[in-house]
Amino acid sequence: MSAEMLLKHFSRISEVPDSVPRLRRFILDLAVRGKLVEQYPGDEPASSLLEGIRKLAGSASLSKTPPDGCFPLPHGWSWSDIGSITTKTGSGSTPRGGQSAYQASGIPFLRSQNIYNNGLRLNEVAYIDDATHRRMRGTAVEPGDLLLNITGGSIGRCCRISDDPIQANISQHVAIIRVAFAEMRDFVHKVVLSPFFQSFVTDEQTGAGRGGLPKNRMDRIPIALPPLKEQHRIVTKINELMSLCDQLEDVRTEREEWRDRLVTASLNRISTETATPKEIDSHLNHLPRLTTRPEHLRQLRKVVLNLSVHGRLVAQDLTDESTDDLLNVIHQDQREAIRHGHLKKRPSTDKSSCKGLFSIPSQWRWVKLGDLITFGPQNGISPKETKDIQAPKALTLTATTSGFFNGSHYKHVELSECECENYWLSAGDVLFQRGNTREYVGIAAIFDGPAESFVSPDLMIRVRFSKHLDLRFVHTVLISPPLREYFSSGATGASTTMPKINQALLLNAPIPVPPLTEQRRIVAKVDELMLLCNQLEDQLATTEADSRRFVEAVLSDARQS
C-alpha cells in the first residue's frame, strides 16, 4: 500500500461512504502483518529485543508459539504477547466514596469517555484530590503509557500518553499497558488499534451486559513483534498514510458539502413563489448530476410534494371546469351518503370557514377534509390477538407507516364474521394513523388490498373520499409537508406516550382542491418525478455497490502484493 496507489484510485475509492475508515483499518492490518514496509536483513531480530525485555522486566519467557490461525511472520519477527512486552498491565479502580470523591479541580481522574485513539479528551474529565491520588498510586498514569478502554461500548479505544510529565489516575473501565521499552510505545499503540488486536479484545470479553476484558485475558493477546528498526519504519509509514487519509477525508467532506449546498440552493430556487412550472422542470433536469446521497432524494421528494399542493408543479389551464362546480357535485354525493347512513353527520359546507395554510391559485379552493368524504370517519377495532392462522387479519401500524399500504404487516385476531362486517377494508379506503410518534402520527395511506381480507385496527381512522375527486391527488396532499405538519402539531399527548389525533382534527384538516383535470395533471407529474427519484435511488445503490467491489479489489491487490 502506497500513497501513490491511494491517489491513483482516490476518485473511485472516495465515492464509498465508509472508504476512508476502511482504508485506515486496512493500513493497520498490513502493518501488523509485516506487509507495509520492507524487511532489512541487517536489522537486529525481534528475538534479541525480547531477550532485552526479559532481562529488564524479569519475564520468564521469550518468543511465544503462534496462536491458531495466525499469519506467518516475516524474517526477523517473533510472536509474543502483551504480558511479555510490558512492565505493567491492569485496570484502575473507583475512588473511595465513588462520585462524591470528585472535585472541581485537582488530579485528573481518567474514565472511558476521556480515552480516544488520537489522544485524551478532557472536556468531561473528573478530578480527585491529592490524598486520593496518593491512595490510588497503583492506578497512577506515567508518561508514555497506553490507556485502553476495557468495558462498554467504547471497549478497544486506546490512546498513547505523551512522554511529558503527567499526574492522573484511571478508573476501573480503563487499563494501563506500560510497554517495557519506550522505543516500542508508538508501534504497540498501532498494534492495539489494528483489526487483528481489536478482534481479540472483542472475543476475550467476559460478563453479561457491559462486559469487560480481564487482565489475564488482555495479557495473553498475541502480538507479532518486528525488529525495533522496522517498528520505527512501520510507524513512520503508518503516519504518512494516515495523514493522506486525513486529506482524502477532508476532500470528500468538502466535496459533499459543496454538493449539499448546490442541491439545497437548487431546491430553494424552485421553491420560491416566482418559479414557474417551466423553470422548475429545468432545475429538476439538472438535479440527477448533483444527487449523490439518499438525503438528497429525500429532500427532492419533499419539494415535489410541496410544489404539487401549492399549485406550482404544473401550469393552470383557464379552460378547466370550475372547482366550485366540482364541490357542488361532491356535496350531492355527501347528501346521498348521509341518507344511506355512511356519514355520521352532515359535514359543514361553509367553504369560507376553512382557513388555508398557504396561498393557492385563484381557481383552487380551500376545503375542510370533512367536506370531501362520503364515509367515516371510523376508528378501527382492537380485538385480542390469536395464533389461529384461519382467524381474520388486522393491520398493524407498520402496514401504512411509509404512507403506502403494505399488506405483509398484520396479526390474526379473535373476531367473528359478524363482528368483522363493519370493519372490513375496501379498495379506496384511506387509513390515517390515529396514534404514533410525532413523525408518523396522522400519516395516510390508500388501502389497495383485496376486499374483506383485512380489518382496520383501533389505532387507525378510516374514511372514504368522494369518487369525483382524484384519490391519488388527495393522498398526495395528505402526505405533503404542510399536512404532515398539521397532523403532527395538532396531535395531543407527550411524545413518550404516542401522540394521537382525533376525528375532529381530521375532519377540519384544510385541503387545497384544484379542478379535477388539474388534479390528474398533478398526479401524472408527481408520478413522473417520483419515478425519477426511484431510478436515481437505484442508480446510487448500484454505483455504491460497484465502488465497494472496486475498493475490495484494490485492497485485495495491496494485501497480496
Image (cartoon, rainbow, N blue to C red):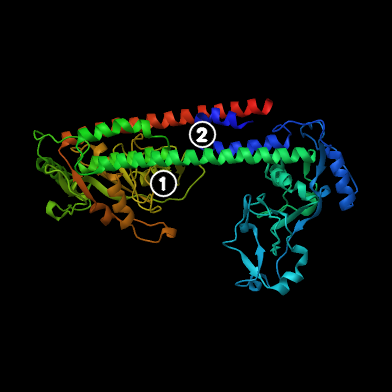
Residue 499 lies in quadrant? bottom left
Residue density around tag 2, few if under 14, some if 14–19, many if 20 or more, within 10 Å: many
Type of amino acid at the residue the image marks with label 2: Ser
Task: Tell me the SS state at disc 1.
Answer: helix
- Please tell me which residue is depicted at 23% across the width and 54% down the height of the picture: 508
Q: Which residue does the image show at 34% across and 45% down from the upper left? A: 423
- Res. 123 visible in picture: yes
Residue of label 1: 397
| Location of residue 101 in the rendering, given as x and y in whole percent from the top left corner | 66, 73
Tell whether 356 sits left or right of 8.
left
Along the line of sight, the residue nearer the viewer: 486 or 121: 121
* Quarter of the figure with the C terminus: top right
Disc 2: which residue: 14
Q: Is residue 403 visible?
A: no
Q: Amino acid at mark 1?
A: Leu
Q: Look at 69% across and 44% down and name the residue there.
A: 190
Residue 80 picture location, percent across and down: 82, 42
Percent of width and height locating residue 210: 66, 55
500 w.r.t. 479: above or below:
below
Q: Earlier in the sequence, mark 1 or mark 2?
A: 2
